[in-house]
Image (cartoon, grey):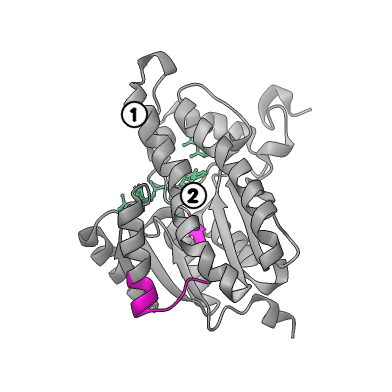
Amino acid sequence: MIQDLFDLKGKVALVTGGGHGIGMAIGKVLAQAGAKVCINGTSAEKLVKSKAEFAEAGIDVFTVAFDVSNEQSVDEGISQIEQEVGQVDILVNNAGIIKRVPILDMPVDDFKQVLDIDLVGPLIVSKRVAPGMIAKRAGKIINICSLMSIYGRTSVSAYAAAKGGLKLLTANMASEWAKYNIQINGIGPGYIATAQTAPIREGGHPFNDLVMARTPAGRWGTPEDIGYAALFLSAKASEFVNGQLLFVDGGITANFGYVKGENDL
Ligand code: NAP
Ligand code: GCO
């Protein structure tokens, strides 16, 4: 049956940064498709609230706090999942931060922190999880990239450097691990309404006008829009898709100019 190609029953999925935002939506969709979902975040206290929010949706998640940028923390967290839930079949490297600061004003340590979490973090977690997938000859890794994986813009140099690197790390993981029946792909969300974009979306911020003018769909994306793409890349249906970056962006990367106002000829 066609739906069997999207059935995740019997699979263990780990979503880093799954405590809210895009990660939470991905976790909910994968759980609704049958996966046993593990949610990661930086603090056990915050995860208590996240677990309750999943429970309100009728979903029982396993929560585990670890810092994706710290190898020992990741090893302890993944070991806890392996002991209490099982081997990770689907890894979504979603955890990430952004610092919006002009290059000349950004301390190098802040630049390094963004790279450590947004680029080195996915490497660390994938290196810890991949051996089990290789032994099993099956696995899915999804790296949450960005428009900034292919475009720059002012004030997000560290984030763009990290997300640009993540696009090519995805390609390299696919080059090395596809032969083990592991599919590694990226998702490039457009502008999505979450806490991360609230500072440039709310309170009449002019960036909101730019997003509305540049996005052909004429709206901000929802975290669920990303969740549905993650389901496809987590499922059997995408077993011949590898090393790709799937943009889920309302058409913004397909469109050079403005879609509203004087340009809308
Ligand atoms: P968000 O609401 O800020 O959530 C980020 C998540 O990452 C939080 O759950 C946070 O956990 C977690 N996290 C941060 N540092 C961590 C660390 N060192 N270890 C473990 N977890 C960590 O962001 P979002 O908008 O949902 O974005 C999620 C992902 O999508 C990010 O990679 C972001 O770059 C990417 N993205 C977002 C958009 C957008 O428009 N929103 C567009 C493209 C790509 P705590 O809650 O515990 O701090
Ligand atoms: C920004 C936004 C973007 C989005 C996303 C777009 O400040 O430009 O936060 O970076 O988060 O990455 O794909």
User: In the image, what residue occupies the spot 63% across and 41% down?
Assistant: 168
Mark drawn on residue 239: none
Element at badge 2? Answer: helix
Mark drawn on residue 123: 2
Answer left or right for 55 relative to 147. left
Q: Give x and y (percent) for residue 58.
A: 39, 79
User: In the image, what residue occupies the spot 35% across and 69% down?
Assistant: 79
Q: Give x and y (percent) for residue 132.
A: 51, 70
Query: Where does the N terminus fall, quadrant-wise?
Result: bottom right
Q: Is residue 216 above or below residue 240?
A: above
User: In the image, what residue occupies the spot 55% across and 77% down?
Assistant: 33
Instruction: Identify the amino acid type marked 1.
Output: Asp
Element at badge 1? Answer: helix
Q: Give x and y (percent) for residue 30.
A: 52, 71
**Which residues are drawn in magenta?**
80-93
Q: In this rendering, which labeled residue sits more in front, label 2 or label 1?
A: 2
Which one is in front, 190 or 121? 121
Mark drawn on residue 110: 1
89 drawn magenta:
yes
Answer left or right for 71 relative to 227. left
Is residue 97 visible to the viewer in this orientation of the structure? no
